[in-house]
Image (tube, rainbow, N blue to C red):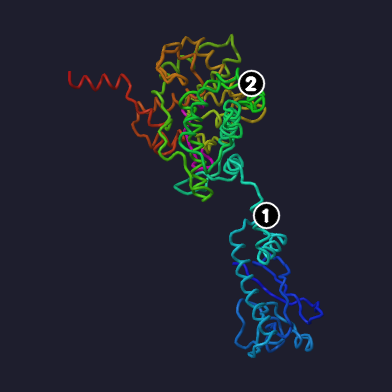
């Protein structure tokens, strides 16, 4: 709790009054001083001293304390206590008494205002300049009201950046988890897309050439229009190339700045971020508007059955002779190791010997690090241990394996599958059209298939989602994890045979 102390300036005006000086402090963490702009006569301002003329400490004045005016304190050369008070002892109405009554009320109101503003202020803003501004605003509210009226309304994108940089993730219903860097980069994709949408509306509709997105006026029909734009943005490129020259689809120089066709799940992921943004605005009372109320457009992601390789296929790849392709052999070994521990590639690339504790790999998943700090522990089986031993000390950076870039790793996996003859057809959902189609498994193989292989094959043998998710790092109740519960053909055949 912050405390306010008052004292009188030693400078006395021609009218015999001195300015009341103020100190705002809280232990050793805060010590700010300022001039109050209130002047009183010394005889109307008291200091507290004790009977032994020593400085009083603490929040309350002792019962043994006596009062002494500033003039008497100076005359008697005593040590005064800074917890001063403006007092008005004269009971006879006079101009002087009226003035000091008002001065006392002003000081009391000012103290309450300062404490109120202090409790609302961010710690890094508590400076002497902040305190002086609070006092100035107290005396001249009309001046600051004019400034606020003249200030332009914060833009839609100012609020979006504020949300990106300052909002917390919800953990157990409370906003206390940090947003990951990956989440922020993905949110920036949404910001750039909405900036392009705003430009598109201005260029394509002469009646809305000054169109801007607004948190207070956006409605569900605006969301529908945005959804349509996101689905068709790739086809708008030829007609409006300047939009993409000014705001590229990607800021990564390794990727195309041109927009690519988006599927339902991609659009849904973007809309989920936009919805979270409006929920945050509502929580902060920045706006009461929420265009998602009653919106019936894209609201949920759709996924097919997760495809993965069997243990037999995994072993075929693991034992295949790739001596003629030494670089592919290294990437194959890393893929098989990932199949044995089931981590995401973002965690795989960071693993070092320090992550291996008592025969198990331990790590905190990077994707959910800001939400929860759960340690994932996966015991190493014989195949994983042998691979780790094979590459011990090989990597110059001290990692478990000589990793390459994640995208190059994915490209190698596809080629490894082809070389090993793992090319069976699987049914997948086309991310753009949303329709089922059959593809050779080697064409869609990636590092994430190793994770699915770990989870899927474990679930075939142990029907305990809690046990498996504790080793895969899936959150409790994860929709992604529930997809692995599909009963495979072998289990179906065994079940049907029960009624043969």
Residue situated in front as seen by the camera: 323 or 430: 430
Residue at 73% from the left image edge and 69% from the top image edge? 35
Numbered range of the magenta stretch: 368-385
Residue density around tag 1, few if under 14, some if 14–19, many if 20 or more, within 10 Å:
few
Residue situated in front as seen by the camera: 3 or 90: 90
Left or right of 275 on screen, residue 71: right
- Image coordinates of residue 34 in percent, x first then y, are 72, 67
* Callout in the foreground (2, 1): 1
Q: Whole-Å distance between the Cαs marked 2 and 1?
A: 40 Å
Question: Element type at marker 1?
Answer: helix
Magenta stretch: includes residue 200: no
Q: On the image, numbered disc 1 is attached to which residue?
A: 147
Q: On the image, numbered disc 2 is attached to which residue?
A: 241
Q: Quadrant of the N terminus?
A: bottom right
Residue at 59% from the left image edge and 9% from the top image edge? 324
Q: Is residue 419 above or below residue 269?
A: above
Left or right of 430 on screen, residue 17: right
Image quadrant assignment for residue 122:
bottom right
Residue situated in front as seen by the camera: 460 or 252: 252
Magenta stretch: includes residue 383: yes
Left or right of 94 on screen, residue 262: left
Image quadrant assignment for residue 325:
top right
Q: Is residue 83 above or below residue 271?
A: below
Specify whether residue 352 is in view: no
Residue most toward the left? 500
């Amino acid at each position: 709790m912050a405390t306010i102390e008052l004292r009188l300036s030693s400078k006395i005006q021609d009218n015999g009054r001195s300015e009341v000086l103020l100190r705002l402090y809280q232990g050793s963490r805060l010590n700010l001083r300022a001039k109050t702009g209130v002047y009183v006569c010394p005889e109307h301002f008291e200091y507290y001293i004790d009977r032994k003329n020593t400085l009083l400490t603490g929040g309350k004045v002792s019962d043994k304390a006596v009062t002494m005016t500033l003039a008497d304190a100076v005359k008697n050369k005593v040590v005064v206590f800074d917890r001063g008070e403006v007092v008005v002892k004269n009971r006879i109405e006079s101009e002087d008494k009226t003035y000091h009554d008002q001065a006392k009320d002003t000081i009391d109101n000012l103290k309450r205002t300062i404490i109120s503003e202090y409790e609302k202020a961010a710690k890094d803003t508590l400076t002497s300049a902040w305190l002086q501004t609070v006092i100035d605003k107290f005396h001249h509210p009309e001046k600051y009201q004019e400034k606020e009226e003249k200030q332009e309304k914060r833009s839609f994108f100012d609020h979006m950046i504020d949300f990106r940089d300052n909002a917390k993730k919800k953990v157990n219903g409370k906003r206390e988890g940090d947003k990951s860097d990956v989440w922020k980069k993905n949110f920036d994709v949404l910001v750039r897309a909405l900036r392009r949408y705003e430009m598109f509306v201005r260029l394509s509709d002469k009646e809305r050439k000054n169109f801007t997105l607004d948190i207070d006026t956006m409605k569900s029909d605006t969301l529908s229009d945005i959804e349509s734009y996101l689905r068709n943005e790739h086809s708008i490129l030829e007609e409006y190339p300047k939009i993409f020259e000014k705001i590229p689809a990607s800021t990564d120089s390794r990727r195309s700045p041109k927009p690519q066709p988006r599927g339902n799940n991609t659009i849904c992921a973007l809309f989920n971020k936009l919805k979270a943004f409006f929920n945050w605005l509502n929580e902060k009372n920045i706006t009461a508007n929420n265009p998602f109320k009653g919106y019936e457009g894209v609201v949920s992601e759709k996924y097919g059955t997760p495809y993965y390789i069997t243990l037999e296929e995994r072993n075929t790849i693991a034992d295949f002779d790739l001596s003629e392709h030494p670089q592919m052999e290294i990437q194959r070994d890393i893929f098989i190791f990932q199949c044995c521990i089931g981590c995401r590639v973002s965690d795989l690339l960071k693993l070092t010997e320090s992550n291996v504790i008592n025969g198990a790999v331990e790590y905190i998943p990077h994707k959910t690090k800001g939400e929860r700090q759960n340690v994932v522990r996966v015991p190493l089986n014989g195949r994983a241990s042998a691979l780790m031993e094979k590459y011990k000390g090989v990597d110059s950076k001290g990692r478990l394996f000589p990793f390459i870039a994640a995208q190059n790793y994915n490209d190698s996996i596809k080629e490894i599958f082809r070389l090993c003859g793992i090319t069976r057809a699987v049914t997948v959902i086309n991310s753009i059209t949303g329709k089922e189609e059959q593809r050779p498994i080697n064409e869609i193989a990636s590092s994430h298939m190793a994770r699915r292989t770990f989870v899927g094959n474990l679930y075939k043998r142990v029907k305990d989602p809690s046990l498996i998710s504790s080793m895969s790092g899936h959150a409790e109740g994860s929709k992604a994890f529930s997809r692995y519960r599909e009963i495979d053909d072998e289990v179906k055949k065994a079940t049907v045979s029960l009624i043969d």
